[in-house]
Image (cartoon, grey):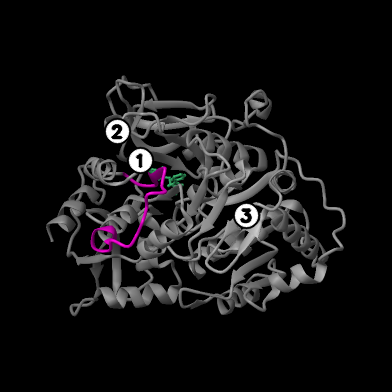
Amino acid sequence: MSYKKDMSKYEHLEGWERCGFGEQLDKWAEKYGERTAVTDSEDEISYMELKQKADCLAAAFLRKGILKGDKVLVQLPNRISFVIVFFALSKIGAVPIMMLPAHREAELEGIIELAKPAAYIVVEKYLGFSYVPMANAMKEKYSCIRHIFVDSESGDISGMIAETCGENGAFPAVDGYETAVLLLSGGTTGVPKLIPRTHTDYMYNARMSAKRCRLDSSDVYLASLPVAHNFPLCCPGLLGTLDVGGKVVLASATSPDDILDAITEEGVTITALVPAMVTVCMEMLEWDENYDISSLRILQVGGAMLEDSLADKIIEEWPCKLMQVFGTAEGLLSFTSPEDEGSLIARCQGTPVSPADEVKIVDEEDKAVPEGVFGELLSRGPYTIDGYYMAEEANKKSFTPDGFYRTGDKAMWTKDGRLRLGGRIKEQINRAGEKIMPSEIEAYLCRHSKIKEAAVVGVPDETLGNRICAFLVTDDEAGIDLQEIHRFLREIGIAAYKMPDQIERVETWPLTSVGKIDKKALERMAQEK
Ligand code: OOB
């Protein structure tokens, strides 16, 4: 038997509440009423209206036959309908699977086969891509998908809200310890793993994050990353901001001008960015003086290694506190504090956000390493999962027998008791905050008729953190170029952020002493090119 988390251990914790997100929304509506809850590029919605619309949509979902426990693929960009859909599904105990707008057929198929969703909710069109043909193709291929709901101006979602308004019946009871969402993890070969988060642990995740940020009802939180991602959704993000009665601004795209415009116009006090985005925002600020970011109180930066020099630069040039954020969708969060000295903030990722987090840093034999020495970061605690969704084999590798999650990250304790991250132990590429498993890309590449073997590595890159380099053994003397690779991968249907940035042909592989492909050598070769 594998380790199972005992929730009763956490019931004494401040911020721990056995309650569903649907019920939370009702409480917020009562408390914050007509205050603005969320704005996007087109509209705004108060707490009360959000509750009313979520109730209508929940009733409509029930009427269409979406049942408690059903999984529902949600692929919506940052807009108010995302928020309504999230709470509507929560209210009836259906479980959203948080797809990103960037995902395509290959990612969808892996997840559909695993989770057998009953419905698929898509935006009609976003950043030039039409989602409806893709959704229809999925419905045709997988009989589990009974419904496609399209979010457009005249589409199903708004129509459903209008139809059912005023006739909200009873919703099924939802227990806080049931699964609220399935988040996506960085993934393994082809099939991404799904991360089941309960209503209670996820709300606690949001509350502890909000507490560390000293968030209150005067705060304006800007979701600049795709809000289906854990960082802007819940750390403290959308959910943490709603809990304190603040306002959430949804930026329609993750581009520096969208972000800086939103900060300037909405008086944003806190936002979350990955390091690569900070760099481009800083460049933009340098040549356009019309932006005003003086309202910012906290800039959260996380999702990927923040170089010391960039941290120093942020502290020097931004009018707000830098908060370093180490986070995982599996749970553990570690942030610096607003009260910490700049010199300390610049060199660590702070401390875990909950007093009940258990964190260990261990060597290859799982023995604790001393302060100042890097090891693998392990975590267990109130909001860290005890297993991936239906993934017995993967769980054996990713968790210790006593239930610690193996993050695969290198970390150490600093002399002042803070965590400092030092890169990856597990083979995973972090490209501008997006996590990519090399084995997944290698498998796609090998489907190409000209490619005999492929090895993919992450190469340090000034703007992206890591870029993706694919080494190929090909059949064809004439070779194959990057364009052709991209075309081929687009046909398979994979997210654009997984496309190789660089390809190199090799005749033979550099090998390690045990005869494996020497990826360290490949990384050096890619860097020299
Ligand atoms: C966030 O979550 P995920 O699940 O997309 O990725 C988690 C991984 C970590 O295991 C680590 O490899 C990397 O992302 N990471 C960092 C980092 N924050 C995350 N590596 C170095 N320094 C950091 N500050 O990325 C995520 C979830 C919640 C909040 C923020 C980020």
Question: Considering only vertical position in the picture, is 473 above or below 277?
Answer: below
Judging depth in this view, the residue of 197 and 49 nearest the camera is 49
State which region is magenta.
284-305
- Work out how far the residue at label 1 is from the one at label 2, CA to CA, in angstroms: 8 Å
Answer whether residue 287 is magenta in the image.
yes
Residue 392 picture quarter:
top right
The image shows residue 148 at horizontal and vertical percentages of: 67, 72
Q: Which residue is mark 3?
A: 36
Q: Which residue is mark 2?
A: 342
Question: Considering only vertical position in the picture, is 343 above or below 423?
Answer: above
- The earlier-in-sequence mark between 1 and 2 is 1
- The earlier-in-sequence mark between 3 and 1 is 3
The kind of residue on which mark 1 rests is Leu
The image shows residue 384 at horizontal and vertical percentages of: 54, 36
The image shows residue 199 at horizontal and vertical percentages of: 66, 42
Q: Residue furthest left?
A: 528
Which disc is residue 322 wearing?
A: 1
